[in-house]
Image: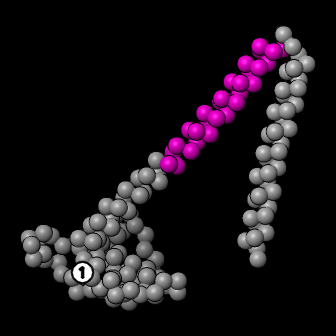
Amino acid sequence: MSEDAKKGRKIDERDKATLDKAPQPEILESDDEGSEGTPQTPKAMRQMMAAFMGFSRSSGGSVYHPIFDKFNDGHVDTFLAHSHEEDMERLRAEHRGPIYGFLYAALVVAVLVFLVLYLLPQDPDLLGEILRLAIAFAGGVGGGYGWRAHLDSRRMDR
């Protein structure tokens, strides 16, 4: 069983072919200790970085840059650290979105309940006008978002 299969990572045949074809810089090929006594990156990580460099060289959108020849283990570690930080921040942001949505909805419901409980006994006509304006405002906001989405979809079709 391969290392990737043990770790639960699925590799399809295209990935395997790309890993086999990907050019691997000399520094990424040694399994022994580094010159300063620091260990080299694990073999699976070297293969992943070689595949990454191969994808970036072969992709139609990006052009090969000679700086990739100078990419070493220190850069790999820095790249992985920054990648992990970005992933954690993205995860935090994804968890904050639903919380804020719930808080906004709860605030709107609380304001409507307060208006109904406070204004219904005192001035029902004012409550009717406020609710009518609130519904018209919500409809305008929803219509604006719908119109914007419609224009964006038409723009994407071109």
- Residue 147 shown left or right of residue 96 in the figure: right
Front in this rendered view, residue 88 or 47: 88
Q: Check if residue 112 falls in the magenta segment.
A: yes
At a point 52% along the width and 43% down the height, the residue shown is 96
Residue at image location 65% in from the left, 30% down from the top: 106
Quarter occupied by the N terminus: bottom left
Image location (x, y in percent) of residue 6: 33, 65
Horizontal and vertical percent for residue 29?
22, 83
Q: Which residue carries the number 1 mark? A: 28
Q: x, y percentage for residue 115?
A: 77, 20
The segment highlighted magenta reads 93-121
**Magenta stretch, main secondary structure class:** helix
Tell me which colouring the rendered structure shows. one colour
Q: Is residue 112 visible?
A: yes
Q: Residue at x 32, y 65 (%)?
A: 80
Q: Position of residue 141 (x, y in %)?
A: 78, 45
Is 95 one of the magenta-colored residues? yes
Corner quadrant of residue 87? bottom left
